[in-house]
Structure formats: structure tokens, C-alpha cells
Image (spheres, rainbow, N blue to C red):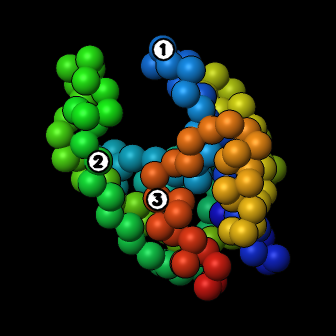
Amino acid sequence: MQRENGDFLVMLRNYKDRGSSVRALLLPGGGLDAGETPEQANTREVREELGVELQVVQFLREVRIVKNYANERPNDPTAAEDECFVYHFYKAGFTGDLTLKEPEKFEELTWVNAENILMLQHARNTLLGDGILEALPALTAS
């Protein structure tokens, strides 16, 4: 989600629900349910997380990231080796008021420009969610 001035929306996610003190800046969105297209999943996830309805205008970019969670979390039996995550980024408008619908997971919403995302990450002492840095060319070109 991006404003006319180029700022995009990030959410501060905590992982208390997973027993972790880790926090990360994430872009709105999430995983696909059975039978969904990436666009449908993004629209549903944004509605669930933020309470707004998206109107997708344009597909911007696909980003693929391979993560090896077995190395990152050696004591986690569910951590897979070489998991591939595919992120789809869209230009979209929205209607409704932005509201954190899952306060047990998300602590904060903020608008930030591409130039300041790393400063915000440092200031909030967080990780930067997968896909954000890879999506910046699409976010700054739109």
C-alpha cells in the first residue's frame, strides 16, 4: 500500500504468538488459501489485517526468496531446508479506515519512504521482513 508521495505502509509484527521476542517490519499481505490467486489472497489478507478493501490497479513485481530455516532455527523440528517464498506486489487503492485487526500480532502501522526504511528498522530495533528490500525497485518506480 503506497501513498501518492511514495511512502508505503509497513506493519510492526511481533512473534509472541510463536513464543519469540523477535519483531519485524512487514508489508501487509500473507499466504494463499486453497484455490486463491495471489491477488485474491492479498486482498483477503489486507482485509483481515487492516480492515480495508483493496482495489488492485496493477501487478508490479514478483520476488522469490529461498530461506533455509533449518540453519536459522536448529532446534525447531518444523524448520525446513530451502523453503521458497514467492511475493507478489501490486499497485492498489483502498477504501475504509486502516485499523490493526490483529493487535496480538501487530503493534504498529506506519508510512515510510524507501530512503528511510533502514533508519526505521534501526530505530524500532527490528528485523526487516522478507521481500521488502527486493520490492523497493517496484515501490519506488510506481
Task: Specify the quadrant of the image occupied by residue 106.
Answer: top right
Return the residue at label 3: 131
Disc 1/disc 3 C-alpha distance (Å): 23 Å
Q: Which residue shows up at 62% across the image and 45% down it?
A: 25
Residue 53 appearing in the image = yes
Q: Which of marks 1 and 3 is nearer the N terminus?
A: 1
Task: Give the answer, above or below, for where 138 lies relative to 89.
Answer: below
Disc 1/disc 2 C-alpha distance (Å): 21 Å
Return the residue at label 1: 19
79 or 93, nearer to the observer: 79
Q: Which amino acid does label 2 sit on?
A: Lys
Q: Earlier in the sequence, mark 1 or mark 2?
A: 1
Q: Point out residue 83 in the picture as x, y percentages from the top left corner.
A: 23, 46
Residue 51 appearing in the image = no
Disc 3/disc 2 C-alpha distance (Å): 11 Å
Q: Point out residue 113 in the picture as x, y percentages from the top left corner.
A: 75, 67
89 or 55, nearer to the observer: 89
13 or 98, nearer to the observer: 13
Q: Which residue shows up at 27% across the image and 54% down it?
A: 66
**The C terminus - image quarter:** bottom right
| SS category of the residue bearing label 3 | loop
Q: Point out residue 125 in the picture as x, y percentages from the top left corner.
A: 68, 37
Q: Residue 128 carries which label?
A: none
64 or 124, nearer to the observer: 124
| SS category of the residue bearing label 1 | loop
Return the residue at label 2: 67
Q: Which amino acid does label 3 sit on?
A: Gly
Task: Give the answer, above or below, for where 133 lies relative to 106.
Answer: below
Task: Give the answer, above or below, for where 78 lies relative to 127.
Answer: above
Disc 2 crowd rating (10 Å Cα; few below 14, some 14-19, many 20+) is: some
Q: Earlier in the sequence, mark 3 or mark 2?
A: 2
Q: Point out residue 50 in the picture as x, y percentages from the top left corner.
A: 67, 44
